[in-house]
Amino acid sequence: MPGSRTPKRAAGERPVKLRLAPGDRERQILDGAIAYFSEVGFSGQTRELAKRLGITQPLLYRYFPNKQALVERVYQTVFEGRWDPAWIPLLKDRAVPLRDRLVEFYRQYAEATYRPEWIRIYMYAGLSDPTLNRRYIQLVRRQLLPVYCRELRNACGLPDTDAEVVEEEMEFVWSLHGGIFYMAMREHVYKTKINVDFLVQVGFAVDNFLAGAKTTYPQLLARFQPEALGRARPARASRTKSA
């Protein structure tokens, strides 16, 4: 029928670009930046990112005034934005065996963070801008590891106190956290085909960790944090300065 056909563009005429609402355009740039930086690292140029998105670099800078602002927003979205405060009460619920709490925590943690873009951006940041990694590690150390350590004390049958968690304890539990992170590294960075279900692997790691902790964790506390065992810290011998 006449008038039912879409008019054809003249030869050489440029296609009309779709105008996006400001919020949609910002999200398009952010999503594109996450995909781009996870592929090439933070050394990637905004000029190339704009080209991939089909926009101009000045338009990109209308939403993010410089590359550092864009990188900061990527960090907030990929790392801080996927941190779930509900993980802490989950780990503290002593009505559930610690083994089951840890497996469930890592199931949820992996769903939120162990994705290709998260893992690859984390690794690229460590190589080019380690301040981003340090910020995330501090988040883990501040909110997660002290809870981990106190629940491990309780699971090992130690006095349930609020004694300060010391560095040696946090390094002890990093052995489990870091080991499970390496599972994601093997899949998303090294592209290794893993034929064992992730939660089965997590169960192996948690069981092995808790079995060893029954013996070694009390020994660690006796040496570095005796208050957690209900003991006083030995007084340090006073030292006299020598000339």
Image: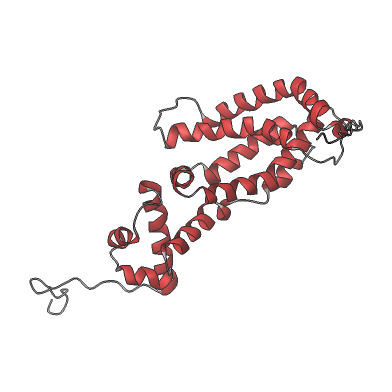
Total marks shown come to: 0
For the residue pair 4 and 27, the one nearer the viewer reads as 27
Taking the image as shown, residue 60 lies to the left or right of residue 141, namely left
For the residue pair 193 and 224, the one nearer the viewer reads as 224
For the residue pair 20 and 70, the one nearer the viewer reads as 70
Taking the image as shown, residue 37 lies to the left or right of residue 184, namely left
Q: Where, by quadrant of the figure, is residue 120 drawn? A: top left
- Residue at 74% in and 41% down: 147
Taking the image as shown, residue 230 lies to the left or right of residue 96, namely right
- Residue at 13% in and 73% down: 13
Q: Position of residue 113 (x, y in %)?
A: 53, 45
Q: Name the image quarter holding the N terminus.
A: bottom left
- Residue at 54% in and 35% down: 181
Residue 227 versus residue 9 in the image, above or below: above
For the residue pair 235 and 27, the one nearer the viewer reads as 235
Q: Position of residue 2 (x, y in %)?
A: 12, 79
Q: Where, by quadrant of the figure, is residue 215 drawn? A: top right
Residue 73 versus residue 36 in the image, above or below: below
Q: Position of residue 67 (x, y in %)?
A: 41, 62
Q: Name the image quarter holding the C terminus.
A: top right
